[in-house]
Amino acid sequence: MLQLDRVAERLRLAEIGAIYASDLNRSVTGARQIGCYHNVAIHSLPELREMYFGDWEGCTLGKIIKDYPEEVEERKKDPAHYACPGGGESISRLSDRIIPAFERIRTEEAGKEIVIVAHGGVNRVILSHVLGLDLSRIFNIQQDYGCLNIVDYFPDTVVVQLING
């Protein structure tokens, strides 16, 4: 979690008003690392979990391409709506889960600086939403482990200050 130590240090002097995280251990741990500098509650939400990949869960890209070549081609044709075999979640369903939670957080914490500690797919969906991008383009946004994205909301506009920092 060295990457999140760096993010925590970078945000040490920020006036954080709320911290939210996926309820998965690595996100909660990261939220605690950031929260150690701030006297705010950490809220963990299952809605902020990473996309469920069904039978592909835990597999490397190489293994998926080798074992599921037809499915990989289907996903390329319609990345937003393709759901992995074994009950996997489509990007569209992922968005349907994340965006209402994200907007609820924004409403409940209006006027505060908010930290959301989540996962690459979750971050990509939120950034696509903020930027007005079609969900089929979420993989055009790079998200490294422990990266920092900064989005500022103003009364009449949204400004993405930083992506993958």
Image (cartoon, rainbow, N blue to C red):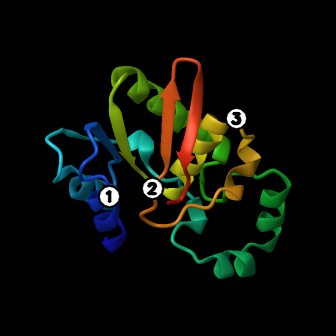
Q: Earlier in the sequence, mark 2 or mark 3?
A: 3
Q: Residues within 10 Å of mark 3 (few under 14, many from 20)?
A: few
Q: Amino acid at mark 1?
A: Arg
Q: How far apart are the alpha carbons under marks 2 and 1?
A: 9 Å
Residue 113: x, y in percent?
A: 34, 35
Q: Is residue 94 visible?
A: no
Image quarter hosting the N terminus: bottom left
Extreme residue toward the top, this view: 155
Q: Earlier in the sequence, mark 2 or mark 1?
A: 1
Is the C-beta separation of discs 1 and 3 under 8 Å?
A: no
What residue sits 60% from the left and 25% below the top? 157
Nearest the viewer among 128 and 86 is 128
Q: Residues within 10 Å of mark 2 (few under 14, many from 20)?
A: many
Residue 60 numbered mark, or none: none
Residue 132 numbered mark, or none: 3
Is the C-beta separation of discs 2 and 1 under 8 Å?
A: yes
Residue 82 shown left or right of residue 55 in the figure: right
Image depth: mark 1 or mark 3 in front:
1
Residue 119 shown left or right of residue 89 in the figure: left
Residue 10 numbered mark, or none: 1
Is the C-beta separation of discs 2 and 3 under 8 Å?
A: no
Image depth: mark 2 or mark 3 in front:
2
What residue sits 59% from the left and 39% below the top? 95
Q: Amino acid at mark 2?
A: Leu
With respect to residue 164, does 42 lie above or below? Answer: above
Q: Is residue 67 visible?
A: yes
Q: Amino acid at mark 3?
A: Gly
Residue 148 numbered mark, or none: 2
Q: Residues within 10 Å of mark 1 (few under 14, many from 20)?
A: few
Q: How far apart are the alpha carbons under marks 2 and 3?
A: 20 Å
